Amino acid sequence: MSETTHAHDEHHGTVLAHPDDTRHNAVAVLIGLIAIVLAIASYSLWVYFKRAAEELTYEVVLSRPNVALQELRAKELQELRGAAITDEAVHLPIEEAIGTFVREAQARERAGLPQRIQPLAEAAGESTTP
């Protein structure tokens, strides 16, 4: 009878060891899943708040007209479209200047001259280097 009792103790001992390992593995998997869910939730919240901040910035700052910028753009547009003569340069309206540039480039190409654009100071004969 002692053999039966001893065999039963061995079998009983191995059966008790498996539930403990399974519980530890299940806890480890559960902790891993919780960590993944928290990482995904954190990233999602970060994206949401970043978008909300961008929308708020646009509404408060970027969507409002800037009077100084509008005045500057109007002045620049007027300068581009108007003709003027200053001390050493002639300013043509942009549409006329484009046409003049193209005609001059075509004439230089027909004459076999290089197509080189130079600053106004060099074109006037002034040296840009000291």
Image (tube, grey):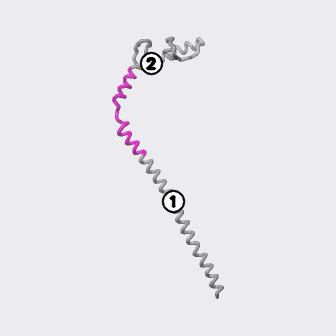
Task: Give the magenta-colored segment's residue range.
Answer: 50-78
Task: Locate residue 64, reporting x and y percent.
Answer: 34, 35
Task: Locate residue 2, reporting x and y percent.
Answer: 64, 87
Query: Which of the 4 image quadrants contains residue 1?
Result: bottom right
Task: Locate residue 73, reporting x and y percent.
Answer: 38, 25
> Which of label 2 and label 1 is nearer to you?
1
Q: Residue at x 45, y 51 (%)?
A: 44
Mark 1, other Cα within 10 Å: few <14 / some 14–19 / many ≥20? few
Q: How many marks?
A: 2
Identify the residue under disc 2. Answer: 95
Q: Residue at x 36, y 37 (%)?
A: 61
**77 vs 63: above or below:** above
Identify the residue under disc 1. Answer: 33
Along the viewing direction, whichever of 50 and 80 lies nearer the viewer? 50
Query: Which of the 4 image quadrants contains residue 5?
Result: bottom right
Residue 83: image tag: none
Mark 2, other Cα within 10 Å: few <14 / some 14–19 / many ≥20? few
Q: Main secondary structure of the magenta part?
A: helix
Q: Taking 65 as reference, is 42 left or right?
A: right
**125 vs 11: above or below:** above
Along the viewing direction, whichever of 4 and 63 lies nearer the viewer? 4
Q: Amino acid at mark 1?
A: Leu
Q: Residue at x 55, y 71 (%)?
A: 20
**57 vs 35: above or below:** above
